[in-house]
Image: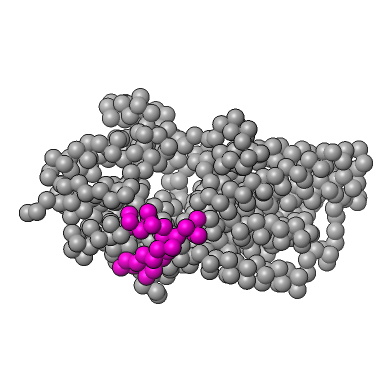
């Protein structure tokens, strides 16, 4: 059978061309990111990573920390700090190394799936210019790491050997160590590929093939995990490493149940739900698209939120058309590509439809969009029945989304791009921040907090930073008192006793400084800490803490004596 877009393996980018493309991406990334890697100081997400790694470096028991992702992701920061010392620049180096690796994986995946070098370079350039949100750059990295290796396996599904499953299994194992939910997600396409490999020959030996392929994948997964498990057992946190994987589906279910059905008898939780606590960040209204011609940010974001839904639909139609006309030879590759794009989609569509999460979604989407364009071109070339207008619209829609992404990502904060760096002309430094460039407003805020903490807190005293600004503690070399580094109004639903515990802990420890950032995390007034956690603020005032404000931040100093 002759398959559309069936090109011999020798025709796809060879070793030299691939090496040149990879080297070009590395050079461009290094030059571009060096222009602004010292720009800005994100005390929220970046600060959380830095502070947790710092606490681990100082010997804090991992059981005493509340970390949102895999412990090994933060252990990487601890390792780097052990080599370089606690440093803000070291944190940024970790993030942008992950970003660069993601761009390389994107290039390699598109080149392999489309056999089109210019298209692969174009997609990689977009990812380089507007990279993922630095602190969560591992989202697209994990997605593309699994996509790339599973695409290679999908190409060999008819001739699959045990050695072919080793690399995908290793990638999956690494993913489980970084963020378990991505690991569970990519178990699905990998399991499907193993089943395809087992049933690829109609000789009745599918059980033996499935056993051998599955055992090979499981063995490699455990081999990659083994050093981590051994060290965790030696250091006393083996339960955390294992339970964070096993408990992840249960934890997600508990969170959803708590948000929609607060525990019976939890008065604070019921009152909070009635007041709107736990409301997720709202998606932009479809009416915002009216401002697209004037490139309004809300309109651009609406395109990025809703446009991929149409592309997913077109991609599904292409899969069905190929299956009906040419058989299922290439369908496994297309399904893996679809899985890679869908892996990060819920975060930007369902939970936090904002630019940072869109940026994390885009690398996987760019792979899917490039494959869609290449497939449409190939299918049109083999069937004149598919109208030229349809093929053109298939190509135009991803380009429109990419153009909107570049426009918004290069002009608005929320990604790892150069946006906003031109306004940062002030040099700021602190104990663990050698020198970064910040805006005048950021300088007044950071310098004000730095000076107050330095003048008020002894080096060994813990401080409080809420609702999400652990970078304030990290930049001054202090440890955190409360184990939760991120709190929002949803805590009233899933942990109704948090405010009472926080008040009790603060009264016992009497921290010298409490830092409260004035931030509506979910875009509602209730989501400001001083509103949903006003009882905590009231307790500080009742205990004699003195309020002292800096731009955008309320600080409370411990009274003398």
For residue 21, which quarter of the picture?
bottom right
The residue drawn where x is 15% and y is 51% is 558
What's drawn in magenta, residue-wise?
A: 420-446
Place of residue 512 in the rendered image (x, y in percent of width and height, measured from the top left): 18, 55
Can residue 252 be seen in the rendering of this structure?
A: yes
Q: Nearer the viewer, residue 413 or 499?
A: 413
Place of residue 252 in the rendered image (x, y in percent of width and height, measured from the top left): 45, 40
The residue drawn where x is 46% and y is 66% is 38
User: Is residue 268 toward the left or the right of residue 99 in the image?
Assistant: left
Looking at the rendered image, the quarter that the C terminus falls into is bottom left
Place of residue 413 in the rendered image (x, y in percent of width and height, measured from the top left): 50, 51
The residue drawn where x is 37% and y is 32% is 277
Classify 31 as above or below 74.
below
User: Is residue 53 toward the left or the right of residue 309 in the image?
Assistant: left
Q: Single out the residue that lies furthest toward the left.
A: 561
For residue 305, which quarter of the picture?
top right
């Amino acid at each position: 059978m002759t398959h559309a877009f069936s090109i011999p393996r020798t025709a796809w980018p060879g070793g030299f061309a691939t090496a040149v493309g990879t080297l070009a991406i590395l050079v461009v990334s290094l030059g571009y990111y060096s222009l602004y890697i010292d720009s800005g100081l994100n005390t929220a997400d970046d600060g959380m990573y830095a502070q947790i790694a710092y606490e681990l470096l100082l010997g804090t028991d991992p059981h005493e920390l509340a970390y949102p992702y895999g412990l090994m992701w933060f252990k990487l920061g601890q390792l780097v700090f052990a080599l370089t010392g606690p440093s803000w620049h070291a944190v940024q180096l970790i993030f942008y190394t992950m970003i660069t690796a993601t761009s390389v994986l994107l290039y390699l995946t598109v080149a392999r799936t489309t056999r089109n070098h210019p298209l692969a370079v174009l997609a990689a350039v977009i990812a380089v210019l507007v990279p993922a949100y630095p602190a969560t750059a591992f989202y697209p990295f994990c997605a593309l790491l699994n996509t790339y290796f599973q695409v290679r396996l999908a190409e060999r599904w008819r001739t699959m050997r045990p050695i072919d499953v080793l690399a995908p299994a290793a990638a999956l194992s690494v993913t489980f160590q970084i963020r378990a939910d991505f690991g569970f997600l990519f178990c699905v396409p990998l399991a499907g590929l193993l089943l395809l490999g087992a049933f690829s020959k109609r000789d009745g030996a599918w059980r033996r093939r499935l056993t051998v392929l599955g055992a090979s994948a499981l063995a490699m997964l455990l081999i990659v995990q083994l050093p981590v498990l051994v060290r965790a057992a030696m250091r006393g946190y083996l339960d955390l490493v294992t339970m964070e994987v096993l408990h992840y589906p249960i934890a997600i279910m508990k969170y959803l149940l708590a948000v929609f059905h607060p525990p019976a008898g939890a008065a604070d939780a019921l009152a909070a739900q009635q007041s709107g606590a736990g409301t997720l960040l709202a998606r932009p209204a479809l009416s915002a698209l009216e401002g697209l011609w004037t490139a309004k940010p809300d309109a651009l974001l609406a395109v990025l939120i809703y446009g991929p839904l149409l592309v997913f639909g077109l991609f599904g139609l292409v899969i069905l058309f190929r299956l009906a006309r040419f058989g299922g030879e290439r369908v496994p590759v297309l399904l893996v590509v679809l899985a890679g794009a869908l892996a990060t989609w819920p975060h930007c569509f369902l939970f936090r439809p904002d630019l940072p999460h869109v940026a994390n979604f885009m690398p996987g989407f760019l792979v899917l969009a490039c494959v869609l364009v290449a497939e449409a071109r190939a299918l049109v070339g083999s069937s004149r029945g598919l109208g030229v207008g349809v093929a053109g619209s298939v190509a135009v829609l991803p380009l429109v989304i990419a153009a909107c992404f570049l426009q918004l990502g290069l002009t608005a904060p929320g990604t790892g791009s150069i946006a906003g760096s031109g306004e940062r002309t002030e040099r700021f430094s602190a104990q663990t921040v050698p020198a970064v460039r910040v805006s005048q407003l950021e300088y007044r805020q950071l310098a004000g907090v730095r000076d107050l903490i330095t003048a008020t807190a002894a080096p060994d005293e813990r401080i409080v930073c809420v609702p999400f600004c652990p970078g304030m503690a990290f930049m001054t070399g202090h440890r955190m008192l409360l184990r939760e580094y991120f709190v929002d109004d949803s805590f009233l639903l899933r942990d109704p006793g948090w405010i009472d515990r926080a008040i009790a802990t603060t009264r016992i420890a009497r921290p010298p400084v409490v830092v409260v950032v004035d931030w509506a995390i979910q875009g509602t007034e209730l989501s400001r800490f001083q509103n949903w956690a006003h009882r905590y603020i009231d307790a500080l005032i009742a205990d004699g803490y003195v309020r002292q404000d800096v731009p955008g931040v309320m600080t409370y100093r411990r009274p003398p004596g």
